[in-house]
Image (tube, grey):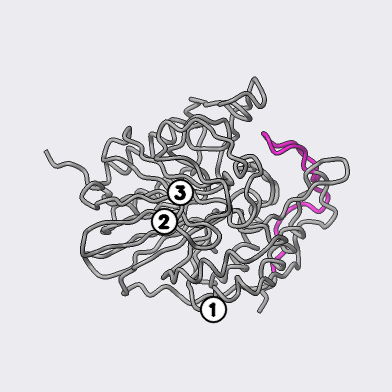
Amino acid sequence: MTKRINKVAQAAGIVAAMCFSAGGLAAEDSEGTGANLTVPEMTSPPLDPNAPLSRVAFGSCFNQNKEQEIWRAVRAAEPDAFLFMGDNMYADKFSEAGERLTSPALIAEAYGELARSEPFAELRRDTPVLATWDDHDYGLNDAGADYIYKKQSERLFLDAWGATQSDPRRGRDGVYTSGVYGPEGRRVQIILLDTRYFRSPFKPTDEPKAPGKEIYLPDDDPQKTILGKAQWAWLETELKKPADVRLIVSSYQVAAEGHGYERWGLLPLERRRLYDLIFTTGANGVVILSGDRHLGAIYRDETAPAYPLYEVTSSSLNAPSWSWAQGEREPGPKRIADTYGDVNFGLIQFDWEADALGLELRGGDGALQRGVMVRLSDLRASVN
């Protein structure tokens, strides 16, 4: 099934070559502004809001042109749902001159290639898939609020993932969404943030490739944002809803330190705002899930005011970084154990009887590679 993209209100003569903060030069879009493009609708069963969750799988960074076997390992884990955390396909390409090419047509083409993956289709037949995006399925490496095709990209995203015409995302900017699943006492809130549509430019490094400042530097500019005004207000409302566990999906890392790639710590005031919001709303049971890095890792951040925040980074589903796969390491002051550099997906196991969560990273064969058990009582703010 396909859905037709309405023509967006943008001048036909727009200059499409422009510079991004770190994504390189986006070469010209010869395909126009995205009018009349169609994408396959990648349907999956709805997630039952009343059924308690036992297992939730998650992952990021899937190259639609590479091997597809990871989906069979995900399916064998029998998750109640799969959270696609971004870079769900790769739409931007390099020109012969080494410039990054981006266009609505390339985005639509990449969704079509993803939809043709039979192993992914097998997963979708019996497993609900909930998705947000990161830069490469948004349309351009490291792109943020200044991405010129973000409105077209949002329409393609919503059509590809089967958003109904009554879906709130159809009437607002950004692809953030949430839901609460399970009965009282076993309620799981899943919050998928949009860390691209509104995000201010990161501060470029003054020493490219230097350890800890490879591409970007931390920036205390109070005018800069990751989520944008409307999404911050929405998130506050969501965190006030009753839930026993909250899975907050950020496409790139929140707690991680020690590297100069995209992460919340590059805008430390925004990260502090997130931590403070969890505290002031009384949102117990928060676990952060992230991707983007082409490595897997588990973090514990004790600087959060409410309680220690755990984060599981799962990346990549089928395109591991050569350097991480060869054993290269990076500083990780908040990391539990070492990174995992091969293909991986994440799995949350809910042990409701024991009042505990299993936070896991699994390899391409489904075997456990990293894991930690967390008691839900440790994810509740202390009462004085």
Assign a secondary structure to mark 3. helix
Name the residue carrying label 2. 191
Question: What's the residue type where badge 2 is placed?
Answer: Ile
Give the CA distance from mark 3 to mark 2.
Answer: 12 Å
User: Quadrant location of residue 323?
Assistant: top right
Name the residue carrying label 3. 231
Assign a secondary structure to mark 1. helix
Percent across and percent down for residue 363 are: 52, 57
Classify residue 256 as left or right of residue 187.
Answer: right
- Disc 3 crowd rating (10 Å Cα; few below 14, some 14-19, many 20+) is many
Residue 125: mark? 1
The residue range painted magenta reads: 5-26
Percent across and percent down for residue 128 are: 48, 72
Farthest residue to the top: give it: 206
Question: What's the residue type where badge 3 is placed?
Answer: Gln
Assign a secondary structure to mark 2. strand
